[in-house]
Amino acid sequence: MTFDVHQLDAFVLVGAVVTLAAILAVRVSAGAGLPSLLIYLFIGVLLGEGGPFAIPFDDAQLAHALGFGALAIILAEGGLTTDWRQMRSSIRLGISLATLGVAVSVAVVAVGTHYLLGLPWELAVLLGAVCSPTDAAAVFSVLRVVPLPKRLTGALEAESGLNDAPTVVLVGIISTGAVGEAGLFEVAGTIVFELVAGGLIGAACGFAGAWLMRRVALPSSGLYPLAVMCLAFLAYGAAAAVHASGFAAIYVAALILGNSELPHRVATRSFAEGVAWLAQIGLFVMLGLLLSPGRIDLDTVVDALVTGLVLTFVARPLSVLVSTVVQRMGARDMVFISWAGLRGAVPIVLATIPLAGGVEGADHLFDIVFVMVVVYTLLTGPTLPWVARLLGVALRSEPRGLDVEAAPLERVAADLLQVTIAPRSKMHGVEVGELRLPQGASVSLVIRAGDVLVPERRTVLRAGDDLVVVTPRKLREATETRLRQVSENGRLAQWLGDPSRRERD
């Protein structure tokens, strides 16, 4: 098959139109409280063989490969934009949900669908493995607009970032028929090896990359986001090369890089978010194209609804209950975490593995997963804020904070911090002298409504101000910590202590 410049022009035109439509759809989905993935899926279905445009696409192997690439980008963005201080207190529960919880969920769904739907054991276990992981894109996009305490957001984000790895291994082994030959203990050992090795490789790449980025003065600020993303994908490639989990590696590496003191950190996160949005749009549209609506009949819908009921109301609560053995939680927290097990692209992408491998019944499994994801995302996504308020786990106000961007000043071994005071920050009304920054750090400029002010000690800061702070590099962490203390506690922060050490209840 040849691909000439005229086809490229047509591809660019259609791609630009679809991408713009998908971007505009974000606004619609945000207003309705729906994950935007549903709109992207329906765009793909409309473009596919069952829609008015009838674009043919049935290459499951290509969808599998592109899907894994898109998931890697989404996990990298999730790691780069996750605050480790928020996740740290719940990391044990997140890991338990991603491993022990997945095992319980797979077993419950397999048993339930085997006896309720009459699926063969191989297909039932495959369905359980495919449906068990939560989706990073759905979790990151929905939970970050729901005001929740750190103990919940940290656990859910850690789970969604780490549970892809064991399920990818399990689905791959079952699809190749190797599970019967290998045995349960060998399969479990393979999963543990891939997770641990992938995590260690990701940590090594993350720490080494952070050390390198702090010491290399690149000629353009636009190169820093590219370099950070390349470091994250270096971890993915290195782990895959030794048959470890690339997903675990890229998430851990990105988590370390995103929480390190790097130049142009805010710009890097913004770049990662943009690339992740593009990956999500392409992924969901492609998965919509892969669906054949003509295959979906009443039996498929019934199977999908039954699978979703077992997963949502039996498997998920049991997996959460078992997972809390490593970290106790209250009943209300467990109920919310059970309801917040959002599914999205991950189950559909995993369903392309047996489809690409030619497993018998894989078409039916793909259709079941597709319908189930659509129906239960419509059920759980929009109701999360309401459920959080009903259970009393929602915070009454949005977190207070400020954005800090840093650029290196190599000749004087200092950093230039650009600080934006958020609308609800308690830094509003504080005088510059009351910031009490570490000795050697100072506020050099205040930009207010487009005007540049040279501040004095009595200059009063306002919400929306941009501050230019110069700090010696060795004091940068202390300077940022002090700014965040004042942002959360105001001028009394010196006596109230460091708010980042206190759990928000």
Image: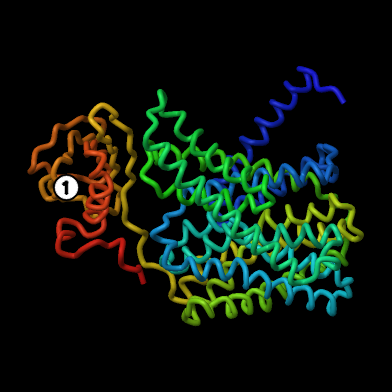
Position of 91 relative to 240 (above/below): below
For the point 49% across and 34% down, the residue is 227
Position of 200 relative to 313 (above/below): above
Can residue 154 be seen at all in this image of the molecule?
yes
Total number of numbered discs in the rendering: 1
| Residue 494, horizontal then vertical, whole percent | 15, 59
* Three-letter amino acid code of the residue under disc 1: Leu
Q: Residues within 10 Å of mark 1 (few under 14, many from 20)?
A: many
Q: Quadrant of the N terminus?
A: top right
Can residue 378 be seen at all in this image of the molecule?
no
For the point 53% across and 55% down, the residue is 140
Q: Quadrant of the C terminus?
A: bottom left
| Residue 91, horizontal then vertical, whole percent | 48, 66
Q: Which of 173 and 134 lies nearest the eye of the viewer?
A: 173
Circle 1 sits on which residue?
A: 437
Looking at the rendering, which quadrant does residue 337 occupy?
Answer: bottom right
| Residue 166, horizontal then vertical, whole percent | 67, 62
Q: Which of 227 and 474 lies nearest the eye of the viewer?
A: 474
SS at mark 1 in the image: loop
Q: How is the image coloured?
A: rainbow
| Residue 213, horizontal then vertical, whole percent | 42, 36
For the point 30% across and 42% down, the residue is 420
Q: Residue furthest bottom?
A: 331
Position of 208 relative to 489 (above/below): above
Left of 110 or right of it: where is 498?
A: left
